[in-house]
Amino acid sequence: MSDVSTIYARWLSGELTAQEIEALKASGEWEELQSIINAVDELALPAYDKDAAYAKLKRKPNAQPKVRRLNFRTVGAIAASLLLLLGILWFLQQQTTEVSAGIAETLDYELPDKSTVKLNDGSSIIYKKSKWSDERTIELTGEAMFEVEKGQPFKVITPNGTVEVLGTSFNVRSWGSNLFVECYTGKVKVTSTSHGLILTPGKSVNTINGQMQNAQDFSHEKPLWSTGISRFYNEDINTIFEELERQFNIEVKMIDQVNNRLSGKFNHQSLEEALLQICGSAGLFYDISDDKKNVEISKKSNDKTY
């Protein structure tokens, strides 16, 4: 891209400095850019009336074509403007929207079609707003509950598999090598590697390292994390401690290498109770720093709490 086009692209991204904006205004290019943006917003082709066009042609059977000389400077300016316009259109289409929940917090977000996403702590989604009406596709990192309006197919893509629905509510958890999906209403299709499964309300499935397990029943009507409980299903214990770090905004240090896989849960109210629930199941010991910001995990007690 030319220097000017690069400046325009940075303006669209909100990256221009105050000095650069003043320079654009002083050169007159600021007004040109505004007019192009307005043209993009209002860009539309009028409906073509072929009957009226044919009638007009019949009224002038002997019309002679008019020859006009082209001003090459004008042609060049028009071509440059068209190229810039196409560049801006392309740039806008490639723009993605990223939404993230911070550590130890959750976030509610509404998508362009009124579908909603509730993000668990440390989780994020990425999607293209400009193409949303034609392609409802989201990339998810972490865990989120979705309530989807009916319409075009709705896809949630994770590193461990894809979830596809038409209109329903469901929860997707994708941390480490696990993909866990619960369906609350409607139907959900879960795909991982060469496996696929349709979930109905009250059904869940866990996928570990690409291997899909049998569907399981559950009775709750919304994800447990939204009620202050983290639930894990045959997950690597290091992934569980990463969840603990996100929920309590702490740092966990593993003194010994541990490769256990666990199923269980911990609550978000008390760090010590959560550690007791995890370490008690795994036969591990923990030590909490005085400021409650750091936790050490080991296989031996060494006067540490079990």
Image (cartoon, rainbow, N blue to C red):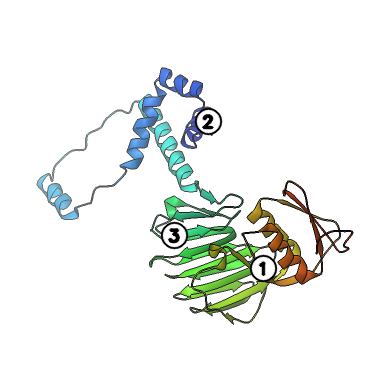
**Front-lying residue, 2 or 123:** 123
Residue under numbered circle 2: 2
The quarter of the image holding the N terminus is: top right
Q: Which residue lies furthest to the left in this view?
A: 59
Residue under numbered circle 3: 116
Tell me if residue 119 comes above or below residue 6 in the rendering.
Answer: below
Label 3 CA crowd tier, 10 Å (few <14, some 14–19, many 20+): some
Cα distance in 3D space between marks 3 and 2: 40 Å
Cα distance in 3D space between marks 3 and 1: 24 Å
Q: What is the x, y in percent for residue 250?
A: 70, 51
Residue under numbered circle 1: 178
Q: What is the x, y in percent for residue 109?
A: 46, 54
Front of the two marks 3 and 2: 3
Amino acid under disc 2? Ser
Amino acid under disc 1? Asn
Q: Label 1's element?
A: strand
The quarter of the image holding the C terminus is: bottom right
Indicate which disc, 3 or 2, sits on the residue closer to the N terminus. Answer: 2
**Front-lying residue, 208 or 122:** 122
Position of residue 271 in the picture relative to residue 302 (left or right): left
